[in-house]
Amino acid sequence: MILDCAGKALDLSVPQVMGILNITPDSFSDGGQFSDIDAALFQAERMVEEGAAIIDIGGESTRPGAEAVSVQEELDRVIPVIERLAAAVPLPVSIDSNKPQVMREAVNAGAGLINDVMALQAQGALDVVRELTVPVCMMHMQGQPRSMQRNPVYSDVVDDIMAFFAERIRACQQAGIDRSRLIIDPGFGFGKTLAHNQTLLKHLERFAQLQLPVLVGISRKSMIAAMLDAAPVDQRLFGSLAAAVMAYERGASIIRVHDVKPTVDALRVASAVLQVD
Ligand code: 8Y4
């Protein structure tokens, strides 16, 4: 299957890597424009060379406990980078935002995919996305970023999240968003205990039953640390690669990572073996 990301093709018949582009806000330079944007472009070019298929850009931290960012602040951070990047690289640029106004301006600036950790539940998001024609990833989160890790509870984590997707897919179709534009993501670490995250990864193939592309983001997350004696963030690569390969074997087609080259190599090996009869 091939997705049209604002004129850039994304081939999902092979595993694809989404590279995470960190935009460092408020750095020293005068006005911030020169060094911030150039640093982001440099990092993105490297991810392209390393085999990324998508570059994901976010201007708001969605980590547990993170502070909210105003719409204007988020636009100021991401729009200049998207404009330059979309023109400079052959890959689709993804906008990581839950705000309809940011989604619209990002797509107008050249973004080819929307990555929404709130699964289009923000006021007005469904209507804006109907008008844009790009694919959208809807991620599951239980609770709000500030408090989601306090005491997450599910009756059955896979069943509950499947039911969530069924409802969101219906909401999209009711809003006039074609099913062919949808990607789903169980949202590792977003309102989940370690046991929930492990169950989701072990049984990830059940999400493939919805017949939509599955995206996962596990790279360097605390679930990896929790299985590696609390490894610090710079010691989580090999564990993240194991999780990436497991997710791919269970039907994920897009893996969102910090470490592009190691993940691309791991998935090339896994894919070559799985393609043998
Ligand atoms: C270390 C490294 C510790 C990373 C925490 C983190 C996802 C996502 C995020 C995801 C999709 C993160 C924007 C959290 N995670 N989008 N975004 N799926 N679709 N934390 O899993 O990377 S941000």
Image (cartoon, rainbow, N blue to C red):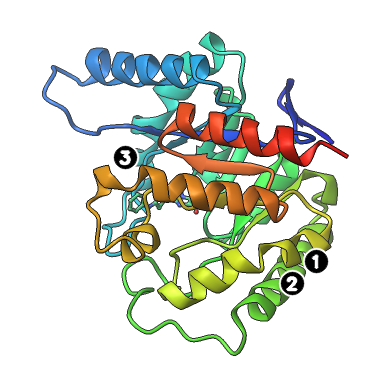
**Residue for point 84% across, 45% down:** 180
- Judged from the image, the secondary structure of the residue bearing numbered disc 2 is helix
Which of pointers 3 and 2 indicates the residue nearer the eye? Answer: 2
Q: Residues within 10 Å of mark 3 (few under 14, many from 20)?
A: few
Q: Which residue is mark 1?
A: 170
**Going by the image, does 177 lie left or right of 128?**
right
Q: Quadrant of residue 264?
A: top right
Instruction: Please name the amino acid that badge 3 sits on.
Output: Glu
Find out whether the residues at labels 1 and 2 contact each other: C-beta distance under 8 Å. yes
Q: Which residue is mark 3?
A: 73
- The CA distance from mark 1 to mark 3 is 32 Å
Precedes in sequence: disc 1 or disc 3: 3
Give the answer, above or below, for where 166 lies relative to 74: below
Instruction: Please name the amino acid that badge 2 sits on.
Output: Glu
Label total for image: 3
| Visible residue check, residue 108 | yes
Give the answer, above or below, for where 18 lies relative to 208: above
Location of residue 68 in the rendering, given as x and y in whole percent from the top left corner: 31, 56
Q: Quadrant of residue 38?
A: top left
**Going by the image, does 165 lie left or right of 241?**
right
- The CA distance from mark 3 to mark 2 is 32 Å
**Going by the image, does 139 lie left or right of 152?**
right
**Residue for point 26% across, 32% down:** 24
- The CA distance from mark 1 to mark 2 is 5 Å
- Judged from the image, the secondary structure of the residue bearing numbered disc 3 is helix
Q: Which residue is mark 2?
A: 167
Precedes in sequence: disc 3 or disc 2: 3
Instruction: Please name the amino acid that badge 1 sits on.
Output: Arg
Q: Is mark 3 within 8 Å of ligand 1?
A: no
